[in-house]
Amino acid sequence: MSKKWYNLFVSVDPGEAGLAESPAQTAPAAEAGPQPRSAAQAVAEIAATVAAEAKFTSPVRDPASFDQIYQAAEIASPAHGYSILKVAEMLASGHIRDLPPEVKRSSILVALDAAGVKVQEVIQDAVRRDRALDTFERVQQKSLEEMEARKGEENRQIQAEIDRLVAERRARIQANNDEVSKQRDSFQRWRLEKQREEQKIADAVNYFVTENPITTGGPAPAPPKSSKTSGA
């Protein structure tokens, strides 16, 4: 992926040699010679000097701390102090923040020249930090994907257990309903037999009474509850 911040100090004007330099570092151009490098070529050459994959030698306890990520990747601030983070702070300072881009670039280049720092060193530092962040991102993404896979499998097992329990409970409910239905059917058959038996009894009693006391339609009403009265 192309990183625009690598090109901050790289010349993009036609005919320039690639990396921008302070006036003190610029030498007269030869009248004849090979074609100058493009800005992209210059950046690619610098990036090629940095390992494509950062190596982490210690764990990162706080992923939100970029300082810990850089430390784990063994990226220390250079002795002269001009890391890409320092340059970013300088660019954001109130002294040059609102100046035109070319003026800001020239101001930083003058400061780097005064400190004896090459632009290549700053861009290398930027590439190292960027690749450390990219590597850490891949590690984090892989960790997330592995966790998602584990949790997904765990969820599938839980869902299977839920489905099994639901099926068991539904089977119990159905069994209960079947048992009730069976008992109801049995009771209805008994009731029919009971009505026939009552009808047979009623028919026999009917010869001897004017008011037949035998019930034949349904259950006989419950006898009234006896009440007790207390004496005064």
Image: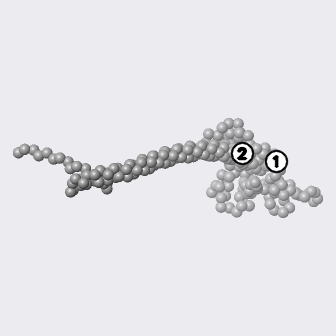
Q: Residue at position x 82%, y 47% from top?
A: 48
Q: Residue at position x 68%, y 40% from top?
A: 71
Question: Residue 173, position in %: x, y?
Answer: 47, 47
Q: Give the amino acid at mark 1.
A: Ala
Task: Check residue 89 in the rendering and tell me which mark sits there, or answer none.
Answer: none
Task: Check residue 135 in the rendering and tell me which mark sits there, or answer none.
Answer: 2
In depth, the one of 127 and 178 nearer the eye is 178
CA neighbours of label 2 inside 10 A, class few (<14), some (14 to 19), many (20+): some
In front of the other: label 1 or label 2?
A: 2
In depth, the one of 156 and 176 nearer the eye is 176
User: Disc 1 marks which residue?
Assistant: 48
In depth, the one of 205 and 25 nearer the eye is 205
CA neighbours of label 1 inside 10 A, class few (<14), some (14 to 19), many (20+): few
User: Number of marks in the image?
Assistant: 2
Alpha-carbon span between mark 1 and mark 2: 16 Å
Q: Residue at position x 93%, y 57% from top?
A: 33
Question: Residue 91, position in %: x, y?
Answer: 68, 55
Q: Give the amino acid at mark 2.
A: Thr
Q: In this view, does 57 lie to the left or right of 23?
A: left
Question: Residue 36, position in %: x, y?
Answer: 88, 57
Tell me, yes or no, if residue 2 can be seen here. Answer: yes
- Helix, strand or loop under label 2: helix
- The reply to whether discs 1 and 2 touch (Cβ–Cβ < 8 Å) is no
In depth, the one of 155 and 39 nearer the eye is 155
- Helix, strand or loop under label 1: loop
Tell me, yes or no, if residue 114 can be seen here. Answer: no
Question: Residue 123, position in %: x, y?
Answer: 76, 50
Note whether 149 is above or below 15 in the view shown: above
Q: Residue at position x 24%, y 54% from top?
A: 207
